[in-house]
Amino acid sequence: MIPSTSYAASSAVQSSRASLSSHDIFLEEVEHRTFNWFWETANPRNGLVPDRAPLPHGAASIASVGFGLTAYGIGVERGYITRAQAVERSLVTLRFLLSLPQGRAVNGTAGYRGFFYHFLDSETGLRVADWSELSSIDTALLMAGVLFTQSYYDGHNADEREIRALADKLYRRVNWRWMTGGKSSWLSMGWMPPDKFLSAEWKGYNEGLMLYVMALGAPSHALPAETWDRWTETHKGQQGEFYGHHLLNFAPLFGHQYSESWVDFRDIRDKASRERGYDYFQNSREAVYAQRDYAVHNPGHWRGYDENVWGLTASDGPGEAEREVDGQKRHFMAYSARGAGRDYVLDDGTIAPTAIGGSVAFAPEITLPALKAMKERYGARIYNQYGFLDAFNPSFETKDGFWVDEQQLGIDQGPILLMIENLRSGFVWKVMRKNRYIRAGLEKAGFTGGWLSKPQETMP
């Protein structure tokens, strides 16, 4: 069954791109401000990007580093920085990552078996705390940025050749097979030293799309090809209708955004999507429409929701609290994976601009007016020199009116920046199409059609 909004997806997106001039000034401003978050908050001495900012002496996030490495290429293309500046920052980052110690020790290392801990000290690059896990997905997001540098910096000068060589070394040493724990076909969500894999595994449709492409395409320590079809078999319970839209559900929008920020899934299909009759891009487009329609219906009767103010994904929140709002007892949450889908609904009235901003390339005809209306309605309360603040909640009253986060998060800023650029030019997608490892992973997973039908663009 083809999703109800996806039959016209290609023409709608093309039409929206053709009329981007009406939104271009706005998009340029948001994109530039969001880029500045990465450029100005990263540690220039080692390239580590904070998990969140402003937060003095806060931890760095390896996923944020992956988004940051990609951001610098966008900055060059948009004229925010020079290519020389981007090369210098990227080299500093890759050299530092490769120099960090790896091992099984609880302290004094940055990772193990090529994987990195979720959070690193922003100065030393070492694991920040005993609760920080060796993260499979955050390493994959880091490696997406690493492979972006490998394909983008294609010059023949010494610095750009070194970037490509460092990127190759970092990716090749990730031991994806080890992360299965030796007892399962599935990648574990992480590992804790000295020798304990997390019980949670990457099954079901989610941001694991990127993770398994990475693990299949690796030139060493790769997972076997049959892993992909077996993984897609675990998706079937998530297929179904939500608010009139038929899709493969994953409630928080980040699960659709992360993989597609880097990989162009338009018109390429694996066995599972051929059976469904639509590709993963169309599925993500449908998820955006479904969440918009959920907000219009607003079954929870939260304040502020309408066709232009919505967006549920993993984000900060006002904190664990019980309050009475409009005569009803309400439960509010801190950081949570909020979402709305057939799989689950988790909604406390907290709106995350990244849910819309990171989805602009999927459905620009509804996301661009919404993003613009959100800024016009709330202005400086939710928008500052680095673009949209992470989240706000009109139902949670404070002395200033309603709760607004005071920070931006790297993993939420990243999709906004990358997807705005993909909408405007397709730049990140085009760069990643050239990467031999990404292409190998997709082809090993059984993807065909679209850009995969064309000859491989060469890498230097």
Image (spheres, rainbow, N blue to C red):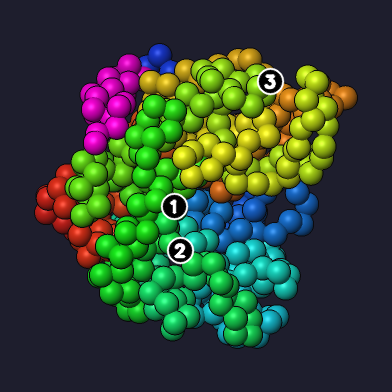
Image quarter for residue 133?
bottom right
Residue 46, placed above or below residue 320: below
Residue, disc 1: 206
Q: Looking at the picture, how far across and down is residue 115, in whole percent?
A: 51, 73
Compared across the picture, whether 440 is left or right of 379 comes to: left
**Which secondary structure lies at badge 1?**
loop
Q: Amino acid at mark 3?
A: Arg
**Mark carried by residue 303:** 3
**Image quadrant in which the N terminus is located:** top left
Question: Could you tell me which residue is drawn at 65 percent across and 54 percent down?
Answer: 50
Q: Looking at the picture, how far across and down is residue 349, in whole percent?
A: 67, 30
Residue, disc 2: 202
Question: Could you tell me which residue is drawn at 46 percent across and 76 percent down?
Answer: 179
* Residue stretch rendered in magenta on the structure: 1-20
Report if residue 11 lies within the magenta region. yes
Image quarter for residue 159?
bottom left
Q: CA distance from mark 3 to mark 1?
A: 29 Å
Report if residue 364 lies within the magenta region. no
Q: CA distance from mark 1 to mark 2?
A: 8 Å
The residue lying toward the viewer, choosing from 76 and 360, is: 360
Q: Are marks 3 and 1 in contact (CB under 8 Å)?
A: no
Q: Amino acid at mark 1?
A: Asn
